[in-house]
Image: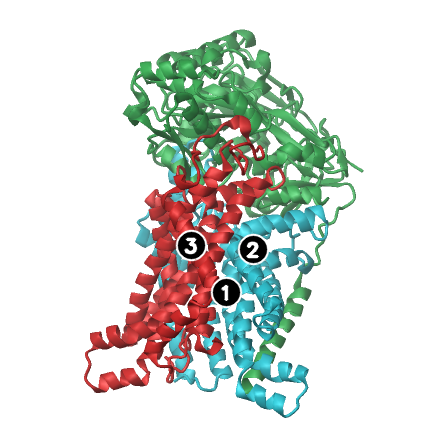
Amino acid sequence: MRGAKSATMVIGAIAIALTATACGGGSSSNGAEDGVVRAWWGDPQNPLEPANTNEVNGGKVLDMIFSDLKEYDPKNSQAYLASADSITSTDQQTFTIKVKPGLKFSDGTPVTASSFVDAWNYGALLTNTQKNASFFSNIDGFSQVHPDKGQPTAKTMSGLKVVDNLTFTVKLTQKFSAWPDSLGYKAFAPLPKSFFTDHAKWIAQPVGDGPYKVVSYTKGQSMKLVPNPYYVGQQKPKNKGVLLKVYTDENTAYADLQAGQLDVLDSIPASDIPHVKGDMGGRYLNLPAGINQALSFPLNQKTWGASGMEKVRQGISMAIDRDSITKKIFQGTRSPATDFTAPVLGTAGGYSTDICGDVCKYNPTKAKELIKEGGGIPGGKFTISYNADTGSHKTWVDAVCNSVNNALGTQACVGNPVGTFADFRNQITTKQMINPFRAGWQMDYPLIDDFLAPLWGTNASSNDSQYTNPDFDKLISQAEAEPDKAKSVALYQQAEKLLVKDMPSIPLWSQNGGVAWSDRVSDVTENPFSYPVFYNITVK
Amino acid sequence: MGRYVIRRLLQMVPVFIGTTLLIFVMVYALGDPVAAMFGDRAPDPATAAQIRHNLYLDHPLWQQYLHYMQGIFSGDFGTAFDGQPVTQLMSSAFPVTLRLTLVAFAIEGIIGIALGLLAGMRRGRFADTGVLGFTLLMISIPVFVTGYLLQYFVAVKWQLANPAVADGAPFGDLILPGIVLAGVSLAYVARLTRTSVAENARADYIRTAVAKGMPRRRVISAHLLRNSLIPVVTFLGTDIGNLMAGAVVTERIFNVKGVGFQLYQGILRQNPPTVVGFVTILVLVFLAANLLVDLLYAVLDPRIRYA
Amino acid sequence: MPETTNSPVADQVPTPVEAVAAAAAPEQRDAPRSLWNDAWHDLRRKPVFYISSLLILFLIAISLWPSLITSTSPYACDLGKSQMGPANGHPFGFDTQGCDVYARTVYGARASVAVGIFTTLGATILGSVLGGLAGFYGGWWDAILSRISDIFFGIPILLGGVVFLSVIKGGSITTVVTFMVLLGWPQIARIARGAVITAKQQDYVQAARALGASSSRMLLRHIAPNALAPVIVVATIALGTYISLEATLSFLGVGLKPPTVSWGIDISQASTMIRNAPHMLLWPAGALSVTVLAFIMLGDAVRDALDPKLR
């Protein structure tokens, strides 16, 4: 019975191993800490440096731990002076910025003019490989610290000058009247001395000047934030802190919310939207956000870029039943596009309900006519590419294709999933896309400029369609230089009308941010960037 | 025996090199990871070039591989794109997955053997058919369906467990994902036990034991079960490796930040150090488990000897 | 290598399927000819065999001619009917896109059955040739092949799938089958290798060798027919798991692509919709389970028939 004995021993060994590991850990409880909000989070992709964070998960934290020169009102997205005492300019090109006296970082060190200047120079310098470096590109001297080719010839931008402890000046390469309003973007955040002296430590536990302070950060697991004792601004937290919990799947987070293990979830799975109100007893909000989605065409390809093809593109736009899709697929959490911006801008900010006009309205008859006039769909068939790994794009791409197919009466359109986002982006940036692809744009700051200039300017940073129109470029630089806001917006809208004519991309809908919360917390809302407004949340 | 073990260990070296090379080439084949780091924005060419340079991506593939292997031999497994050393990811992910694996393992061992014994003892009767049907069902339903169904009903609707695994992966939270992960293997264990028990039930030594008036319970525990478990134990041994590697879907559904989760992130972000590091360790675990099982086999079955 | 190989799996890793087969591997001491006759005789008396065979024939028929039992197109979708329940002429209701679930379930059979059958064929042929040769010739070839299959066992399915889908730009049945064959052959190769090693040492093979039979003759005439039984058993069980794997690949976003209609795609879309529209999950998942069941039941029946101890 030698074998049998060994078998028993093996089982015994396993039992011992089981108990041994049981003692090894797992004592940490996820139970609710008094006064602390437990919120959904995803693993940030990059180190949490302000000029290096370009996605929502990192952005959520930066939003809590930094206070910029300007901040945006969560209700109407108007920019107001936060850390800045004043920002003035006489020529719309050189700005004098005064920082409020007495501000402190969460480590107790003062916020000064050089906190901003050093941070911006750090963000712009090529060798620091900050992914948002291009946000500093309109500051004088950027091309020396960040040349297109070769090594930088300077370490600091000549356009930034410290005048005194709390004052500095910024010289732009060209006139841009609305520039101060873009300063609420977190790439423009100030950095404390410790960021430069002990970088590794700062990365492990970021220090900012915002309403919250990071007390612990376990990468890939969770981050604990408490109110920053030195913060004196108007976003004073009404709770005792926030615990951000990393989830691998939003469906799981939703299950956790229902089970009372999570307090705030700002990414509701599409499948749960129909019953979220019932599940949460009405504790759900659906607010417009500065995010829109579109169908971009590769205009560098002869098939789609030839002149006359704009009619085909307009035709496809009119074959998409935006009303039904937003209602049935998105349960009303997206609004059909009426222009190239998003409703959060407000009409004064440049949002319009009729710039796109009939071209964005469903009209199968007109769609067929236009496509025929334009010479038909190249090859009679096209695909819509999307990345399959995140964002459940499949559902709406399929719905768009079905809508086009039903309108045209042929099987012309089919979805084309691409395995990873990385692969998807590579195909776009290396100009390998031969057919339309999904495009999403999340605004950096609530200005109409951000919805137009980076996307459609010739060689602009996010011009994935390779669109180019000199008239458009001219109107945009006129609009940027115009000091009067109303006149400036009118110029932007004039440029936007060119887009409707050329249709480099089909506007589909603008996205709402949805947030649901447990009965433990109240006063939950979202800002136009679709981040929960954490400082306002109260805990029972 | 000693020579055999040494030879097997030596064979692991080419497997190790082969695996790292193969996985490295596969991740490389996915293309340039830099574009995705910029999100929906097109990368600024100068920054992208600088990042490529910093990550050693501007060299030909074979140089990148040599550079990586050089690092490995000095204990440096590289860093993930968010700046975390891969070794650090491993030290947080492997213990969690190991715990999940052990829970799944215990479930499949205990329930699987119990069901198999039941079916094997009552061959052809209702209990047997029931167990067979149950195991077939387990094999035929995709893991993510069982995962979502159990999560919704057990955790959300009836509130019997937590829907997601808390940080530190306490054992209580791991039971549900453990069941899901163990599902298919459990079915195999049950079927294996059933076959083995049914075979041994007719063996001469059982007949002898029954004939000499041994109590039924003792016949089952001392003779039948012990002998029938040899192939089962062998199977369970190798399954540890399978369970550890196969938890991608389960870990995603139950929010377990283990090996599967890190691998998934690594693949989506096309980060060679993360993927190669994790897969290589998995293959080594797999090989070690194989070797142990082969040795165990020789211990359990005296007819086998290794030279 | 084992000095004596009474067990076919002494130097191998029993994977789940393999372990089952190993336990079921027929005792080769029986007269080789009568094994197959006995098995057939035994099978004909089993109702399970008939039920599963009929089911499989039916599935193959509707894969070839789906219009036999439905006249609705799986591509005719009306968003207005999104997630609605059964209606006249649409017995299974509608999915999120407003497509007919019945038509999609019927048309989906083709992809699943094709993936199952072709993957099994590919993996079995590749695996048994490579595994058989390794088992027969032994030595270096054997060591190299075994270690290569170790490496393949270690590759995570997800990684393989993502790489394949990105590099080959596929998503058709052919690409998915190719990928699954690449991943599946080592399993079969191990079974085949073990079976050949066992068969090689049987008295009648030794006798043939003593009589001066050539290597190829020994391999083809004497060893292959006897080593085939366990391979067939494992292959039929594996077929079911391949179909299931296709669904998992689709769930991870690296499986079949539209316009291919497949249960896997529909199940992965419906898996999070259980609360809104359970019928969307129920029908394709049910169809998938029944198909997998049919193949596993067939495999089971064949295994029981080939195992003289259980008769």
Q: Chain B is drawn in which colour?
A: cyan
Q: Position of residue B51 (x, y in %)?
A: 41, 41
Q: What residue type is labelled 2?
A: Gly
Q: How far apart are marks 3 and 1 (CA)?
A: 34 Å
Q: Judge left or right: residue C189 versus residue C87.
A: left
Q: Colour of chain A?
A: green
- Secondary structure under tag 3 reads helix
Q: How far apart are marks 2 and 3 (CA)?
A: 39 Å
Q: Mark 1 points at which residue?
A: B241
Please determine if labels 1 and 2 lie on a single subunit.
yes
Sequence-first disc among 1 and 2: 1
Identify the residue at horizontal 63%, vertical 43% (top origin): A253
Please determine if labels 2 and 3 lie on a single subunit.
no
Q: Where is residue A307 in the image (x, y as percent from the top left)?
A: 30, 16
Crowding near the residue tagged with mark 3, few <14, some 14–19, many ≥20 C-alpha atoms within 10 Å: many
Whether residue B288 appears in this view of the structure is no
Please determine if labels 3 and 1 lie on a single subunit.
no
- Considering depth in this image, is B199 or A449 the residue closer to the camera? B199
Q: What chain does mark 2 sit on?
A: B
Q: Mark 2 points at which residue?
A: B258
- Considering depth in this image, is A121 or C253 the residue closer to the camera? C253
Q: Which chain is red?
A: C
